[in-house]
Image: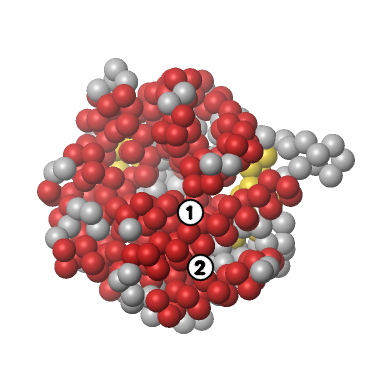
């Protein structure tokens, strides 16, 4: 069976069994999707080999495949390339599921290319994405003490961006002067808190826990509107710590709900509740989640921004769906039965849709998913396969497999 037919068979099965509560059927379907991810991962590894030498440059990380293309565009692992940790993370997840030793060896090599980040000053907030997706998963699966050291050093580096007057981590130092954003914090930063929580538990710098909590609290206070939709960027006064304004950078406008930004919030506050067990975070993340779910289209894959006036003729964002699906599977463990069922069923519907012919790449490309939107206002990565969509997709599938 070729990949296109395989993908179609998954979709038909998901459509037919979507409301079925038989865990055996659901597990089979989930494993079929994971098998597809492994097949695509192996295709990518072959593609990354030099046509002349057969050698892989482990510093070149897959980033995207534009809609009109069929091969990965790779970027050099660097402090500026915020997506460089996702491909190693996919390999770790791939090894976790398949136990394929070849995938393991590639995971180690690609991960090693990011060690330099633990030894240089912070360029911006993305160190959590870069290091915890790669080294974090690597340490979880191997207990390699060298991986632990890299994570701890990187967490200390990330903490240097913390401004105690504001109570959050600075996201983009490079944007302070050009945009007159003295201290800017973007919603994406909520994902990087997980590395701080982990380092506080596994290292000697216990202050990292307090930084993560203060950041979460200030973001909860200033980054959301009354209806629990979020700004992409909160701009603060560096001296008083007061909120100056909430704006967008990648959304439709300053007052819109950018889908991936809200997704980062859902995922991030789920992690904060997990690490603190403070009920205020559980209450809050449900409100942030419920407004997202209430506005989803029928197939549960959001448009890139919920307030784009061109809907339904606007690009979708499969990456936002993958992020939220992964978060909802975890969040369903923390809430009462009725709400748990809503969250888990929504995650399943998202994964069913993402596994269909409409969203899966199949034979056409070696990525997992089509139809993600990176930076719509800049005209960048629109209707593309993007590496972080694939990362959260395989993560969500593994979480679902463990749950059923």
Q: Position of residue 180 (x, y in %)?
A: 41, 45
Q: Position of residue 215 (x, y in %)?
A: 26, 39
Residue 185 shown left or right of residue 374 in the figure: left
State whether residue 248 appears in this view: no
The residue nearer to you, when weighing 175 against 81, is: 81
- Residue drawn at x 58%, y 70% as measured from the top left: 7
Find the distance from the CA under tag 2 to the CA under tag 1.
Answer: 11 Å
- Residue drawn at x 45%, y 47% as measured from the top left: 179
- Residue drawn at x 67%, y 35% as measured from the top left: 58
Element on which disc 2 rests: loop
Image quadrant of residue 116? top right
Which numbered circle lies on residue 394?
Answer: 1
Q: Position of residue 251 (x, y in %)?
A: 43, 62
Image quadrant of residue 156? top left
| Residue, far left | 279
The residue nearer to you, when weighing 251 against 7, is: 7
Residue marked by disc 2:
355
Please state, as top left, top right, bottom left or bottom right, where the C terminus lies in the image: bottom left
Which numbered circle lies on residue 161?
Answer: none
Residue 227 shown left or right of residue 20 in the figure: left
Element on which disc 1 rests: helix
């Amino acid at each position: 069976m070729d990949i296109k037919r395989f993908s179609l068979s998954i979709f038909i099965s998901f459509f037919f069994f979507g409301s079925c509560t038989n865990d055996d059927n659901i597990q089979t379907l989930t494993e079929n999707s994971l098998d597809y991810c492994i097949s695509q991962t192996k295709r990518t590894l072959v593609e990354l080999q030099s046509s002349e030498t057969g050698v892989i440059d482990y510093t070149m990380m897959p980033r995207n495949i534009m809609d009109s293309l069929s091969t990965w565009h790779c970027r050099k692992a660097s402090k500026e390339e915020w997506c460089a940790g996702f491909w190693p993370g996919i390999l770790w997840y791939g090894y976790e599921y398949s136990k394929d030793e070849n995938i393991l060896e590639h995971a180690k090599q690609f991960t090693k290319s990011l060690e330099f980040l633990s030894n240089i000053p912070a360029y911006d907030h993305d160190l959590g994405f870069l290091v915890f997706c790669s080294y974090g998963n690597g340490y979880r699966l191997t207990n390699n003490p060298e991986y632990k050291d890299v994570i701890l050093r990187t967490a200390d580096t990330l903490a240097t961006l913390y401004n105690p007057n504001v109570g959050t981590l600075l996201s983009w130092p490079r944007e302070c002067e050009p945009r007159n954003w003295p201290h800017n914090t973007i919603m994406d930063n909520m994902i990087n808190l997980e590395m701080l929580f982990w380092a506080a538990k596994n290292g000697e710098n216990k202050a990292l826990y307090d930084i993560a909590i203060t950041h979460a609290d200030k973001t909860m206070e200033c980054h959301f509107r009354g209806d629990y939709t979020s700004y992409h960027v909160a701009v603060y006064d560096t001296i008083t710590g007061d909120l100056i304004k909430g704006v967008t950078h990648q959304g439709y406008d300053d007052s819109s709900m950018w889908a991936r930004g809200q997704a980062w919030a859902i995922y991030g506050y789920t992690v904060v509740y997990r690490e603190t067990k403070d009920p205020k975070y559980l209450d809050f993340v449900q409100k942030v989640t419920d407004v997202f779910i209430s506005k989803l289209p029928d197939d549960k894959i959001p448009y890139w921004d919920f307030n784009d006036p061109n809907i339904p003729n606007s690009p979708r964002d499969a990456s936002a769906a993958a992020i939220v699906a992964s978060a909802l599977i975890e969040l369903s463990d923390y809430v009462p039965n009725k709400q748990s069922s809503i969250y888990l069923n929504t995650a399943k519907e998202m994964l069913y849709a993402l596994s269909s012919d409409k969203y899966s790449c199949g034979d056409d490309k070696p990525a997992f998913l089509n139809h993600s939107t990176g930076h719509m206002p800049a005209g960048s990565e629109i209707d593309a396969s993007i590496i972080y969509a694939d990362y959260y997709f395989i993560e969500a599938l593994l979480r679902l497999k463990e749950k059923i």
